[in-house]
Amino acid sequence: MQKRKQQTNQPMNFSQKSGKSATPSKTHTTLNLGTAGLRKILVAAGIASLCASCQSPQTPTATTTPGSTPGATPAATPVAVSTPGDPNTVKIVSMLPMTGSALGQAQTMVNGIKQALAETDSKACDGKIKIEYEVFDDATAAAGKWDPAQVTSNSNKAVADGSVVAVIGHYNSGAAKLSIPVLNQANVVMISPANTYPGLTKPGKGEPKEPNVYYPAGTRNFTRVVPADDLQGSVAGNWAKSLGVQKVFILDDQELYGKGIADVFEATAKKLGIQVLGREGIDIKASDYKALMNKIKALNPDMIYFGGTTQSNAGQIIKDMRNVGMAADAVKFMGPDGIKEQALIDAGGKDAEGVYATFGGLPPKELTGAGAKWYESYKAKYNAEPEAYAAYAFESAKVAIAAINKVCKNDRAAIRDAVLATKDFNGVLGTWSFDANGDTSLTTMSGNVVKAGKWEFVSALKTE
């Protein structure tokens, strides 16, 4: 599941996983699963003026100031909420990067959501409630990834549409940081399949004011079906130790997700006795990293750990690492789930061989029970392998549908509460619950490696 260049050691920035675009900007796509075809929607900058009869709860508009820190409070600006045209129709919205190199990952997540809705013919409560689904693109071609202004617009648009009762997103933790407070004051629940930055939910795991700063209404409205990075970073450190790593150089992309997980990895490595030779934040827009790689090579590391994503120029880092003579059999390269996608292999080419990545769960092919059945149905329906987060998007949608089935009316607060109260959910990821912070009880993760041009599962990794 990025902000642009930032000075090294600055406060953590907005993004988690993101995209570097070579594709045109898209308008939002609306999908009414009960009808055929797609309707084009014109996306305005900001929120368009709404009907005179609209209600106006005090809902904030997210700030998009580039220099704001994780603890910054979004500005509060009222957003009018439309009255639903049909009280028996509710809407689920996804906010994912549908533009840029993260599109492949995001599209399989959208596919997973569609699968979940198709299982009940987009209906709930014995057919009394109709569920519509709308896809919001939180990325732009201009940004090449998720865009703060786009996230702001999307969040306000979701709040303004009185039929929206749940949001599935984001892929990027920095995007979630902006949208959660907007949705929070409107009682709209967000279920994330991919946001892993700990500070979104866990006290003491991020900046001093986190996570309460994201919940101005005083109630939680954010949940995630994927384990957070405080677990994944620790697992990565332990895995590196088991792979024989004794000396590591750490890089990060200076963004919310990348810096955060690199921090946890570094702390774990030091605790385990792995020598940290150095650490640097990179400029993700640099054309090459040869000088940096030569500097690292001179220190004779066993591994380079990169806290970041494919869209943070991971492919170029790997190419330059290999080009200066740090061969895969001598110097390992490891990253988090932000690089575990086909786009990394495409970007790194032959140099991606042997790259290691942790993932906050099990790859789709390794799921068992209901997960295995889902995996086979996905391949049959789309004639393709699902990317890592497709199952998590499917699970998120199933959680939203279950909550709608409990409430059986358009009641944002009640649906939010039903989601947060999810216990012993028997889904494709196994049987799990949300804790008081909205975090999943699942902790099993996986180690993966690029072999013969494909990601290959190595083993399940347990938290200590």
Image (spheres, helix red, strand yellow):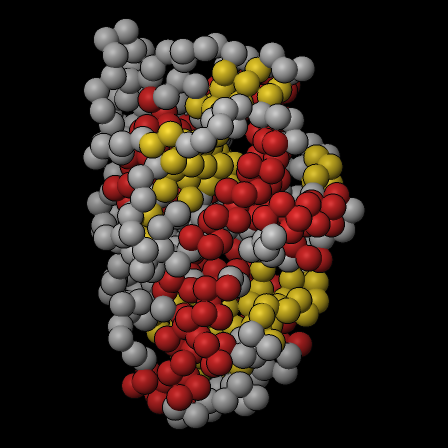
In the image, residue 132 lies at what x, y percent? Answer: 49, 25
User: Going 63% across and 15% down the picture, which residue do you hit?
Assistant: 127
In the image, residue 223 lies at what x, y percent? Answer: 53, 37
Farthest-out residue, right: 369
Identify whether 130 is placed above or below 450: above
Q: Nearer the viewer, residue 41 or 414?
A: 41
Identify whether 333 is placed above or below 121: below
On screen, residue 171 versus residue 424, left or right, reads left
User: Going 25% across and 17% down the picture, which residue do you hit?
Assistant: 50
Quarter occupied by residue 225: top right
In the image, residue 313 lies at what x, y percent? Answer: 36, 68
On screen, residue 277 versus residue 80, left or right, reads right
User: Going 31% across and 44% down the picture, which residue do you hit?
Assistant: 26
Does residue 13 appear in the picture of this structure?
Answer: no
The number of discs equals: 0
Q: Is the C terminus in the top left, top right, bottom left or bottom right quadrant?
A: bottom right
In the image, residue 44 lies at what x, y percent? Answer: 23, 32
On screen, residue 444 versus residue 159, left or right, reads right
